[in-house]
Amino acid sequence: MKKTIYLLIVFILTAVSCKAQSPVISIYDDLKVPRQQNAYYKDTDNDFDRFIGTWKYTNGQEEFTIVLNKKLLDYHTNYKNISYYEDVIYGEFRYVDSNGVELVNTLSNIDSNPTDISEHLIFGNKINPSLFLPSCENCHPNERSIFLSFRDPLRDYIKCELVLRTIPNTQNSNVNDLKAVIRGKYSIIPEGSPTDSRIPYGKYLMIKQ
């Protein structure tokens, strides 16, 4: 009898869970369509998995380190009051300039639990063909990159985008490197404020740690 009741409870919880996350929609295929109530926008092809971990760029004294994690089923309500679930990537970073001065270091925040996960300095879930990138060297037609928001914590009025793609390591074909591009987006700059992020725009070839 107890076993029957237990199985019935499991069935009900499973049914409720499936109903709460329906339909399941691929992020890559349907990112640009209007969000649907209770839908689950899923990383169905596991594109995010290639990017999870710690990556580091070094050039003399300049260092740029990012840590990326993946969260499944992040619950979100948009400005139209549509509630849905989605897989997302979030992260933090450390940047040391060419003079060896540490300008940003929020790596310890990667395990924090903010009320809104988008409060992390790196956040997003947009997947696009790598051919969307300007001057994308050796991009394959079916290759995919991810496009994330990127914030300088002291100049968060400046909108930046972090675009990531994995490329084979030249010395070990079993390992991928990360090519990161930081680029600016349209921003409203307060009068008299700096107009650029303290982390330079451009390309960074990063090695997995």
Image: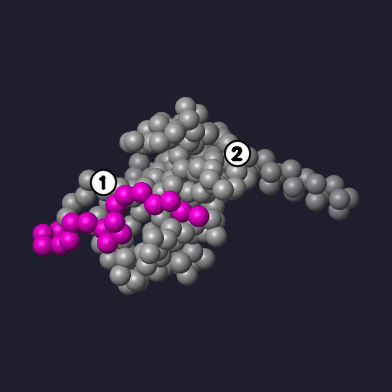
| Residue with the most extreme front position | 171
Crowdedness near tag 1: few (<14), some (14–19) or many (≥20) residues, C-alpha within 10 Å: few
Which residue, given by chain and number where applicable, does mark 1 sit on? 185
Which residue, given by chain and number where applicable, does mark 2 sit on? 19
Q: Residue at x 55, y 60 (%)?
A: 209
Which secondary structure is most common in the magenta stretch? loop
Q: Residue at x 46, y 67 (%)?
A: 107
Residue 29 percent location from the top left of the image: 48, 30
| Residue with the most extreme top position | 141
Specify which label sits upstream in the sequence, 1 or 2. 2
Residue 79 percent location from the top left of the image: 34, 45
Magenta span of residues: 190-207
Q: Which of 121 and 72 lies nearest the eye of the viewer?
A: 121
Instruction: Give the residue type that dot 1 points to.
Output: Lys
Kindly check if marks 1 and 2 are in contact, taking CB atoms under 8 A apart as contact: no
Residue 32 visible:
no
